[in-house]
Amino acid sequence: MKKSVLILVMLFLGLASSIIAQQSHENASKKINAITKKGDYAILELRLNNEDEFRTIEGSETSLTRVSIFTGKNQGAEVIRKGFEGMNTVVEILNDLKSNGWLLEQVYSMKGESLIITHYLLVRKK
């Protein structure tokens, strides 16, 4: 169980870094900070195809792979990155969120026939 959580956290971090790379002049944390306040929760979702589970370095650009942030206030703008460029992406996103007042509170995953979905529950502390 701990190994699965660690793998999922690493996957999330890789996706998070690609999200930051995809942002023009505004990063993911600034976008969600503008619509949230201290104490609010957000969910960072990493959705991968089962075969992407082992592509933690090179990533994948399959159509089902994406990174999204759900705040309850950003309907229609949840998807922040399509594709997966590797675990460095996820690390960059998590570091960006942490440096802008977001703390990781819980990680949980769901595995289906063809998808692995990991949710990172974040709380805004600043």
Image (cartoon, grey):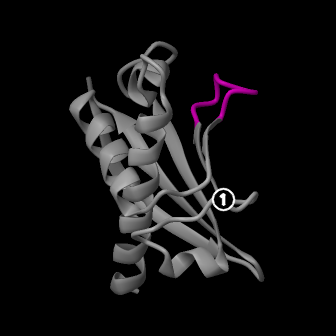
Residue at image coords 49%, 75%: 55
How far across and how far down the image is residue 86, in percent?
A: 43, 62
Residue 49 in the figure: left or right of residue 123 = right
Residue 45 in the figure: left or right of residue 126 = right
Q: In the rendered image, which residue does mark 1 sit on?
A: 65
Q: Quadrant of the N terminus?
A: bottom left
Residue 5 found in image quarter: bottom left
Residues packed near mark 1 inside 10 Å, few (<14), some (14 to 19) or many (20 plus)? many
How far across and how far down the image is residue 59, in percent?
A: 50, 65
Camera-nearest residue between 125 and 82:
82
Where 43 falls versus 116 (above or below)? above
Q: Under tag 1, what secondary structure?
A: loop
Q: Is residue 75 magenta?
A: yes
Where 86 falls versus 82 (above or below)? below
Residue at image coords 45%, 68%: 58
| Identity, as a three-letter code, of the amino acid under mark 1 | Thr
Residue 33 found in image quarter: top left
Residue furthest to the left in view is 99
Q: Which residues are magenta?
A: 70-78
How far across and how far down the image is residue 73, in percent?
A: 64, 22
Residue 1 in the figure: left or right of residue 54 = left
Residue at image coords 58%, 64%: 60
Q: Quadrant of the C terminus?
A: top left
Q: Is residue 90 magenta?
A: no
Residue at image coords 57%, 52%: 45
How far across and how far down the image is residue 41, in percent?
A: 47, 36
Q: Main secondary structure of the magenta part?
A: loop
Residue 12 in the figure: left or right of residue 49 = left
